Image: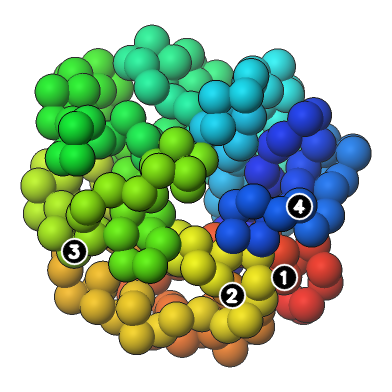
Amino acid sequence: MLIPCIDLQDGQAVQLVHGRKRELAVADVLGLLDRFGHYAWLHVIDLDAAMRRGQSNRLVQQLCREARRKFKIKLRVGGGIRTVRRAESLIALGVEQIIVGSAAFRRQRPNLPFLKRLDNRIGKKHVLIALDTAKGRIVIHGWRKSLSLAPAEVMSALEPYCAGFLCTDVDREGTMRGVNLAWFRQLRRSTQLPIVAAGGISTARQITALQKIGMDAAVGMALYKNRLR
């Protein structure tokens, strides 16, 4: 299944290469709902919050309300979700799942106390944990800080606290160089939970290949550049 991504930065929907260089920006963020409204799921990521450069709360709320009201889309929202209160506020807006990345780790290890509190308050069915990886290691804080951990090393410890994982290949993110199927197959062997794959996806054939190994595909750049039909 293809899942469109709306990444928010400075009030616009943007696409970045390797999470750093801006490749394109769309000013009419709410207008993207008309384009993506026929999909079953939508990912909304607040990059400003993820990078600790402010937040896009109002725009996130508008997207959530309009997507639910007009299109009945299931929403996943991530970026800077560091407290249980923030997670609860998004669930109250009708968000189906929140995406937790940086807050899932503390001192180079899984932050299990936080994840336990999150499970107690909103339930693990509403939590997707982001395991974004550059050069084989998990990266957090807007992909600026690298941990000494690989995704496969922590999946079993995190499984009791989430409904699945969002795994982004940051080395290929935004490049449309093609998906690293070998890496995703390795991740598929490391957990029985659902995995959403992201990074480098550029063709419908690659999305089909991911489906065959049991993964959905979160896609940004290829959609915005009309590479997919």
Residue under label 1: 222
User: Are circles 1 and 3 on residues that touch, CB within 8 Å?
Assistant: no
Q: Earlier in the sequence, mark 4 or mark 1?
A: 4
Inter-mark Cα distance, 2 to 1:
7 Å
Q: Earlier in the sequence, mark 1 or mark 3?
A: 3
Between disc 4 and disc 1, the foreground one is 4
Q: Secondary structure at mark 1?
A: helix
Query: Which numbered circle lies on residue 201?
Result: 2
Relative to 120, say whether 11 is above or below: below
Q: Quadrant of the C terminus?
A: bottom right
Q: Earlier in the sequence, mark 4 or mark 3?
A: 4
Q: Earlier in the sequence, mark 4 or mark 2?
A: 4
Q: Earlier in the sequence, mark 3 or mark 2?
A: 3
Residue under label 4: 22
Relative to 204, say whether 35 is above or below: above
Between disc 3 and disc 2, the foreground one is 3
Q: Secondary structure at mark 3?
A: helix
For label 1, the crowd category at 10 Å Cα-Cα, with few meaning under 14, some 14 to 19 and many 20 or more, is many
Q: Amino acid at mark 4?
A: Arg
Inter-mark Cα distance, 3 to 2:
21 Å
Q: Position of residue 5 (x, y in %)?
A: 63, 52
Answer whether residue 198 is visible to the viewer in this image: no
Left or right: 161, with 60 as reference point: left
Inter-mark Cα distance, 1 to 3:
27 Å
For label 4, the crowd category at 10 Å Cα-Cα, with few meaning under 14, some 14 to 19 and many 20 or more, is few
Q: Secondary structure at mark 4?
A: strand
Residue under label 3: 152
Inter-mark Cα distance, 4 to 2:
17 Å
Between disc 4 and disc 2, the foreground one is 4
How many labels, in total?
4
